[in-house]
Amino acid sequence: MDDDLRPDPDALLAALPAPRGKLKLFFGAAPGVGKTYAMLAEAQEKRAAGLDVVVGWVDTHGRAETEALLAGLEVLPRKQIAWRGKQVPEFDLDAVLARRPALVVVDELPHSNAPGSRHPKRWQDVDELLAAGIDVYSAMNVQHLDSLNDVVSGVTGVAVAETVPDHVFDRASEVRLVDLPPDDLLLRLAAGKVYLPEVAERAAGHFFRKGNLIALRELALRRLADRVDGQMRAQREVQSRAPVWATSLGVLLVLGQGDEDSAVRQAARLARALSAPWHAVWVDRGHASAAARSRALAALAQAEEQGAHTLVLAGPVPASLIADYARRHNLSLLALSQRGNRARGFWRASLQQQLAQRAPELNCLILAAGERAKAAAAGWRWPDAGGWWQSTLACLALTAAMLPLRGVLDAANLVMLYLLLVLLAAVRYGRTPAAWAAVLSVALFDFFFIEPHLSFAVSDIQYLITFAVMLTVGLVAGQLVASQRQSAAQAGRREAHTRYLYEMARELGSALMPEQVGEITGRFLQASLNAQISLWLPDAEEQLEALPDTPLAVDAALVRWSFDHQQAAGQGTHTLPDAAQLYLPLQAPMRTRGVLVVAVPDALALADPDNRRLCEAVAALAAQTLERLHYIEVAQQTLLSMESERLRHSLLAALSHDLRTPLTALSGNAETLLLALQREGRAEQEQAALLLAQSQRITRLVTNLLEMARLQAGGVTLHQDWLPADEVIGSAIAALGGVLDTHPLQLDIDPACPMLYGDAILLERLLVNLLENAAKYSPPGSPICVSAAAEDGRILLRVADRGPGLPPGDPARLFDAFSRGERESAISGVGLGLAICRTIADVHGARLSAANRHDGGACFTLSLPQLPPPALDFDPENLP
Amino acid sequence: MHALTALIIEDEAAIRRFVRSALEDEGYRVFEADTVARGLIEAGTRKPDVLVLDLGLPDGDGVSLLLDLRSWSKVPVIVLSARVDEVDKIAALDAGADDYLTKPFGVGELLARVRALQRRRSGGEGNGSLVRLGEAVTVDLANRSVSRGGEPVHLTQLEYRLLATLLAHRGKVLTHRQLLQEVWGPGYVEHSHYLRIYMAHLRQKLEADPAQPRFLRTETGVGYRLL
């Protein structure tokens, strides 16, 4: 069926990006091709078209023609960052975020920020600008692309330290290639038109060779073609779910064999070329030096940045671990580095051979050794001192204890005792002390127990076999025991993590207060990572507050940043990696619930993906618990507010009833009295009329007060309906009765005025109050105009009079309760009328404003949103 | 001709007092009751020509009294409500009340309503099938035609049906629900904008000033009334 190949709407929706700013990259093959010039020229065009363009960072390098292009553009000042006693000018990210232009020009995308900046790299600054919805123009060269970096340095022999991850390039909305044929570029260079940074000056002669430039140009063009190709494929995927992509080909990079940097790049490039997912693992066999360990962890982080899933595997037999992992994750292509392959030695099968044995179905790819690997010499280093003294002492003590037994015990039994000692050293102190103990044991055995005594000379050649066996058994046993111990420890740690998470989830399940969440989270991270935590939660105004009892010196600004951007920050991340703690946003399904700050005594601990994941899992659990607590609170408050609304409603109803009943009796009887006295022509009718007028005045007052109380109690339920403007105005006029008799009414209702959508009673009340005011404040006989018309998508109702106009001062203050135009005015009222009007306008989402008419008098305007009118679902001329 | 009788069911003596004197001035014999139970007995025995009913009575709701009353009497009922909530009035009108007054109300207002209801009860002012609305409009019920100032006015079927429904209950407040149900049918009782649009059409065709209608009156939030 064709239907099956139609795009899935969900997939289409998921493919739609969030409203982010657009990045336009000006991409060149080499410095000097004119990227900055092209970028500024385009920025000028945008500015001429009326766009709000600012320049965040541009270095013109003193080129006059480029500088001329800056004319008329707003250039933001640079931020000065103090570093090593110098002031380093840097791009001011916060200034742009505060200024919020439509488009900002930020040159030199690969730039590394001075230490102490928010992000280590400028592309991360740009990413934050894009996330804030600001469009960015930026520029970079092909050698700055992370994946091509070593290729370029291989071609040109010039190493470039500043790179931009490929995903930045691939996700840019637009990439414009600024191209210049190599000959023209060389001409420009010769003419001194190309500025070269001093550092690069020395390399310039080498870099700007024609052959290099041609190669670079080809690389740039090819990379751009790749990008277009990728887009085309992505488009094809969006357009149809063609079964072309059914086969899965995943890449698994095995780290830990030296030159991780180059290996990660190559694997990333490979995965991208194959459009395949990729994973990177490092096998921790328990004897890696701290330096190797941190190198491997850094490479894992780099791989993760390039889109890999990463994991540290632990165990003595790397090949089986890797094979299992690859099978479990359906990764059919293993990437190993060449050096690791070579270094295995002849007596033991290489990792590649082991893998081929264990998992013949997997493809193995041997990555080329990178430039850096060739240069880096593997430094030998003294192993850790732990256990050395103890092993030595144990060997000496054993020898001393055995000396009196020389001749009593057989030499073979003595060897057994030494072997036992080596084994114990392996169990207790690990591999190297065990090896040392083995060597020492052989030496001591030879020296003290083998003829001739007290000499290393050996009389019987047989003993050489004993030594060899003793040494080998010692080393192998030590190795085995140590590996076992290491993987047991690793498994124990993982098991502990899992147990912690289970227990924590269980405890969080019964937490009822945010404080408990903080306490539980803190306790578990303390137990698992020996970490201190601080939990920051937003209050009603979205201000972040730390929970009490979490004494941790925390950077509140970073907490805020992490909360706002929903990204982890601090130690081990890209945002302020120098910070002493890790800041994790508590992301729950509905929103971010706060920030968890984790401080670990060992800085390296957080670089381990295992520990990072544990922290993230803890944060996720805490976030979900906080969200659950939030909804419990919401439910309780809803119940409470429903209850209180019901109470308020019945209270107001009772109050209304109790006030209106005596007022009805008062005014009714006063009127009856007045009528009777009038009939008899008695003089007291004047008092009776006064009685009636005053009781009516109290009635109005009470009505207004009750109305205000009802509206301000917040529990107004709008009975909104479609109302013709003339009906609303007409019913207000009718409700006023005789009040308007003294003022001629001028109605100007546009027949084309669309229907209003509102509460008929409240809108009538609003108009009644406005009309009453107009009648009250304008001289008898002067006209009152009421008009209704639609303008610019809003419906405007106006009440205008020919009175003295508005009192001086802010017209908006007129709408405050108990405020009146004139103080101590002779005109009665307490100034609730307009306050009620404004409240009614507010609940309708309408605006009420007051102004003086230019030819005298005041004019009140109610501006209601114009909504699409309702449909009549039958033929108006005929019956349904 | 015997004197007309009126029954006031109201628990507040001071209000009964002035309503009574107003109605007596109008020539009614007035009876009083202060509870639902008492009111029903009085209504049954006195057979009043008009009934003034307070909605909040000590032993029950005025609406329940109305429902009971309507099962055996067609006496015109004016409801008094101390609450501003339109819901109560609508409930009372749907239960069969003819008109309502919100407390506090004036004596003049009360008497105007009573007179209008009496007029309708005594058969209205038209002769035969011809009904006059205001000065200019004449409705010929027999020929289903309407003229304004002598000129025939074209009404669509729905417009005429709406006008005829209002005419049949002239003087009485008809709630949105009642009108929608009679004119459009039971399926349309929630579509009150239909009613508003057609009422606007009718006013454009029949009233001199549609914004200040003489006989097609709006009862805001409640319904319409033809005077």
Image (spheres, coloured by chain):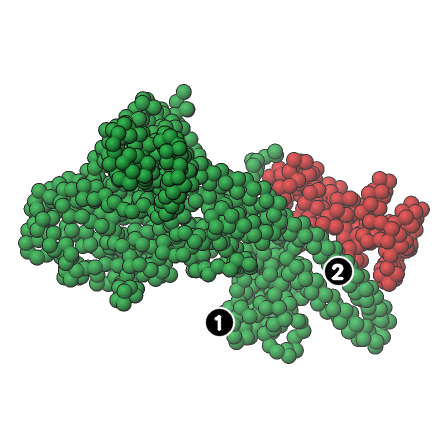
Chain colours: A green, B red
Q: Is residue A505 left or right of residue A581?
A: right
Q: A197 or A384, which is in the foreground?
A: A384
Could you say where residue A390 lies in the image, as x and y percent from the top left? Answer: 39, 46
Q: Chain of mark 1?
A: A
Q: Amino acid at mark 2?
A: Ser
Q: Is residue B28 left or right of residue A625?
A: right
Q: Is residue A17 left or right of residue A585?
A: left
Q: A867 or A493, which is in the foreground?
A: A493
Q: How many marks?
A: 2
Judged from the image, the secondary structure of the residue bearing numbered disc 1 is loop
Residues tagged by mark 1 and mark 2 found on one chain of the structure = yes
* Residue marked by disc 1: A855
The residue lying at 85 percent from left, 42 percent from top is B68
The residue lying at 60 percent from left, 61 percent from top is A839
Q: Residue furthest top?
A: A1
Q: Is residue A78 above or below residue A476?
A: below
Could you say where residue A556 lies in the image, as x and y percent from the top left? Answer: 45, 60
For the residues labelled 1 and 2, say whether their Cβ atoms are less than 8 Å apart: no
